[in-house]
Amino acid sequence: LLLGLSMATRKARIVGFSLCPHLEVLDREYTWFTASTWRSFTWLFDNTTTVLTYAAYVAVFYFVCDVGVGKGATLFLGWMISVMKVLNPAVVLVSFVVLGVGMFLLPPVPGPPVYLTGGVLVVGALEESLGFWPAVMACILLCWFTKLVSCAIQQKLFGENMSGVVGVRYAVGINSLQMRAIRVCLMQKGLSPAKIAILCGGPDWPTSVLCGILRIPLHESLIGTAPVLVLYLGFTTLAGAFQIKMGGSCDTANAAAAAAADLGVLSLSPPPPMPSPPPLIMASAGEANYWQMGGAVALGVAMIGMTCTSFAAVYFMENTIANKRAECDAFPVDQEVEAREHKVAAKRRAYRDATAWVALPCSARLLLASSVLLMTAACHLAGTLGSYCFATFSVTCTVALVDVVLPLGWVAIGLFFTGLALFLCYLVGACRRTQKVMAWSSSALKDDMPALPEAPDKLNPRH
């Protein structure tokens, strides 16, 4: 389809029918396709290693999100809910705070997964003792408390006490122009709109750590972060809590999963029509649809809130860069971080040279291509034939792993982990070749350096 569209566009430009006549100059040296399409295919074949590596990472990300998070996390949360239901409510609250703070302290983890987990885990564990809506309100306040405690720990522990560690400053990106603009916004006195937008819409870990490096007063940081409660935190937690009400009948789901697992074969024929359900089941299904609609609305409102706060943070950052560039450039360059950046850039260049497709041995090419093929096949099985790979269940149901994964699902999991093992073997070999390239570059650089003149010897009378 892309090639046909590109060919039709090229022929239309040849006869003079084009909405972008200025691109005709770029297309003149190509007969069949447009210049942009030809450059895309040129990049595809000139950077085969990069394309296959990106494809492998995309396959890993998709399978982990679809199966690992979609199925594995739901199984884990269902087990956690069943365990926490028998515990004291205080133990449940403390356990979630510890879990949430631990997740927040990981730099790649954003806030929404913590709030969704709290909505499912805390509300599911406290619903029987407190009721649904009181448990929801308690969970929202608990998630808010966890967010503020995590920001305080990030600021005080990582920002202030570990500001001398080069790795922490490098992870923040303290020399980048964007971080310089954020520093200008955060160092404003009081709680300006720009400061609140950065605290609420900026990335969690780097923003809090930067506040600690700049020695921003803790009470200002916490007050500026507090509006997340009404911007998106409460709605995200509510969307997670509504997942509990969409479960349906666990007994039916478990029975269907066990029957499918005992079948042992894959049947692609459609199931026979079910008899009409009694009115009570129809009412339960209608109520589940209302909860599903409420969860979608809550998640949509949370997404709008997060988008607006992120856009506000980006707006104030870009506005600072445009109007206060002199203040941004006035910050001194962190020499240690700059040295780390040069070292990382040199390693990336060495990795690119060592993994060029023409430089790779046949075994490395076979490992990379095979891993991409196997993981892509696993993603297609899990995505296209998901209902034949995994049984349907909800977070309120406690089911065994063998009852959830159907025979075709085990095939998909086997393909994925086999491809992942091959990809890891390729990465290990690529790292070793990169180290060899860097060692060779260092030795060549030393050989090219001119010899230093011999220092005069004071004891030698000839000098």
Image (tube, rainbow, N blue to C red):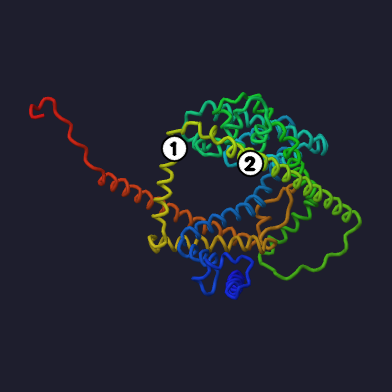
The CA span between labels 2 and 1 is 24 Å
Residue 186 placed where, x, y %? 61, 30
Q: Give the quadrant of the C terminus.
A: top left
Q: Position of residue 161 (x, y in %)?
A: 52, 26
Image quadrant holding the N terminus, namely bottom right
Return the mark for residue 314. 2
- Residue type at mark 1 is Glu
Closer-to-camera residue (391/403): 391
Amino acid identity at mark 2: Val
Note whether 377 is above or below 208 in the view shown.
Answer: below
Position of residue 156 in the picture relative to residue 197 (left or right): left
Q: Nearer the viewer, residue 105 or 283?
A: 105
Q: Farthest residue toward the left?
A: 461
Total count of labels? 2
Q: Nearer the viewer, residue 281 or 22?
A: 22
How many other residues sit within 10 Å of disc 2, few (<14), some (14-19) or many (≥20)? some
- Which residue is disc 1 drawn over? 338
**Element marked by disc 1:** helix
Whole-percent x and y of residue 383?
Answer: 65, 61
How far across and how far down the image is residue 174, in percent?
51, 35
* Label at residue 110: none
**Residue in the foreground of this view, choosing between 289 and 322:** 322
- Helix, strand or loop at label 2? It is helix
First in sequence: mark 2 vs mark 1: 2
Q: Quadrant of residue 77?
A: top right
Q: Nearer the viewer, mark 2 or mark 1?
A: 2
Contact (Cβ within 8 Å) of mark 2 with mark 1: no
Neighbour class for label 1 at 10 Å: few (<14), some, many (≥20)? some
